[in-house]
Amino acid sequence: MKKFLVVISLLLILSSEVLCQQLQSPNGKLSMTFALKADGTPTYALTYSGKSVIKPSELGLELKNDEKSLLNDFSIVKSETATNDSNWEPVWGEVKSIRNHYNEFAVTLLQKGTDRELIIRFRMFDEGLGFRYEFPSQKNLIYFVIKEERTQFAMAGNHTAFWIAGDYDTQEYNYTTSRLSEIRNLMKGSISPNASQTPFSPTGVQTALMMKTDEGLYINIHEAALINYSCMHLNLDDANLIFQSWLTPDAKGDKGYMQAPSTSPWRTVMVSNDAREILASKMTYDLNEPNKIEDTSWIKPVKYMGVWWEMITGKSTWSYTNDLPSIQIGVTDYSTAKPNGTHGANTANVKKYIDFASLHGFDGVLVEGWNIGWEDWFGHHKDNVFDFVTPYPDFDLPGLRDYAKSKGIKLIMHHETSGSTRNYERHLDKAFQFMKDNNYDAVKTGYVGDILPRGYYHYDQWTVNHYQYVVEKAAQYKIMVNAHEAVRPTGIARTYPNMIGNESARGTEFQAFGGSKPNHVTILPFTRLIGGPMDYTPGILK
C-alpha cells in the first residue's frame, strides 16, 4: 500500500512539472530547481539551506501582436553546465580584486508550433542567483516587441520589506518598512511630490528590493547589466505574495523593441542570513561584461564640493537675470540684460569655493548655473534648452579654469538637460570637446523634469539607451560621468568604469525640502547601492 501511494505521488509530481534540473551554489547553500510545467511553461524555485526562498515561479515573455508569445509550449532541446572561478581587478572601488565564482546552467527551449528557441541562463553564486533570457539568431524570431516580461518571484512568506513606490520617472522617495501584505494600504502615503513622477500600481515597488523573513533570512531582488532594455520594477500580487516583473513602457506603451541575437538584463536574487554579506556582494558587477576601456589611467574618483546647495536653499539662483522670461539659445542677447544680483555661479563666488576646496583637501569644485538658459529651463517641455558651451557674462571660464589649476583644483562640469535627451545628444560632441579644451575631465549630468521626446520616461528602453550612449561617448573623450535623475545603476561601472557615480535616489538636497526619514541612509546601502555607488552629495553647511 505504501509503495502504491509513493508511485501515485511521483506521478502527480511528474504530471504538473517535468524534466526538473538543479543548480547549486559553489558552497552548496543555495539550490535552484528548473522545471517545465505540463503545458511547457518554464519555472524555477530557489532554496537556501533547505529553506524556501522563491517558490515555483513562472518564466517567460509576452510579445506584442503575437498570439503565442514566449510563455509556454516549450520543450528542452539542450542543457549545458559550466563553472567559473576567476578574479578581476576593478579600476576603482572598495577592494583591489573581485572573485567571480559561480556554477552555470543554460537551458535551450524549443517552442511547439513556432519553432522558436529561447535560452534561459542561470548563474549561481554563493550570495545568490542570476538569470536572464537569451534570444539566439534564428529565422522565426528576429524583430519582436515586448508587451510585458512575465518573470515571477513567488515569496515563501509575508516578509518585511524595505521599499519605495514603483515609478517610471523617479526613485527620490523615502523608504517604507512594512509587511508585503501592507504595501497596498501604505502606497499612497509613500509617494511624495517630485519634479517628474509616474507611479504605476498600488502594489508596485522598485528594485533593489530588500526583504527580511521571520526566520532572519535576507532576500534582495534587483537586476544587473541593464543594456538596451527597459528598467524592471516589481508588481506584487498581494493575494498570493507573488512579485512579477513590470517593465517601464515607452510613449506607445511598448516595453521593449528587440532584435535577435540579444539578451535581457540579469534578474538577481541575493540571499543570506547575514545582511552584511548582501552588502559586500559583488555579484551584480560579476554579471556585467569586463572593462571595455583600454586605458583607464585617467579615471580617478575624487572628493568634491560645489556651487549648488545655496541655490537649493534659495540663497542664490542658477539664472543670471530676471529680465528675460523667454530664452532662445543662439538668439537671446545677454549682454544687455540686467544681472539679478543673486546668480551663484559668478566668478568671485566660485573663487571662494576654489580657495576653500584647496585649503581643506578637496580635489574638485562643481559649478552649477554657469551656462546660459536657466531663466526658463524647467516646466516647459523645451527642446533646445541649453547648448552646454556658452557661459553667462559674469562667469569667466578661462580665468576660473586657470585659477583652479593654480590651486590644484579641478573644475567639474555641470550638464543639466531638463530631460531633453535629444537636445543633449545633439550637442554632446561639441560639449565634451569644450570640456577637454578647458581642462574638465568629469561631468555631472542632470535630467530634472519630464523626458523629451514627450511621452517617454526616465526608465524606458529609449532613455536607458540614451544614458548608456552618454557614458560611452564620454569614454571616447576620457570624461567621467556622475549622472543625476538617471536610471539606478546595475553594475555597468565594471564595463564602463568612467561611470563614476549616480544619484538615482533621495539625496541630501531633500534636507531643504522637509528632510528624509532618520533611517533613510541606513537602508540605502542595501537597496540603491547594490548596483553601484551613489552621489548622495553629503556635507552641507549652514
Image (spheres, rainbow, N blue to C red):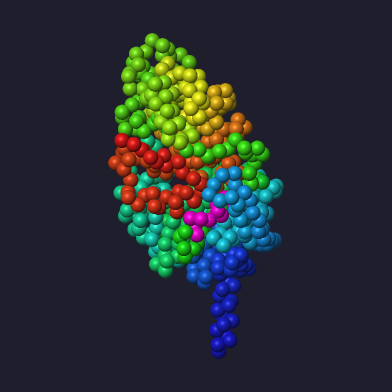
What is the magenta range?
Answer: 277-286
Please say whether residue 533 is one of the residues in the magenta stretch: no
Q: Quadrant of the N terminus?
A: bottom right
Residue under the point 62% across and 67% down: 21
Q: Is residue 295 visible?
A: yes
| Image-based side of 213 in relation to 292, left or right | left
Q: Is residue 535 above or below residue 210?
A: above
Residue nearest the observer in this picture, 530 or 408: 408
Q: Nearer the viewer, residue 404 or 528?
A: 404
The image position of residue 468, as x and y in percent, is: 56, 38
- Please identify the quadrant where the C terminus is shown: top left
Q: Residue at point 48% right, 41% down?
A: 502
Q: Position of residue 263 (x, y in %)?
A: 61, 48
Q: Residue at x 61, y 56 (%)?
A: 99
Most distant residue in the left direction: 514
| Residue farthest toward the top in the current orientation of the protein | 336
Q: Position of residue 11 (x, y in %)?
A: 58, 76
| In front of the other: 134 or 435 | 435
Residue at 39 percent across and 37 percent down: it is 196
Give the dominant element type of the magenta stretch: helix, strand or loop: helix
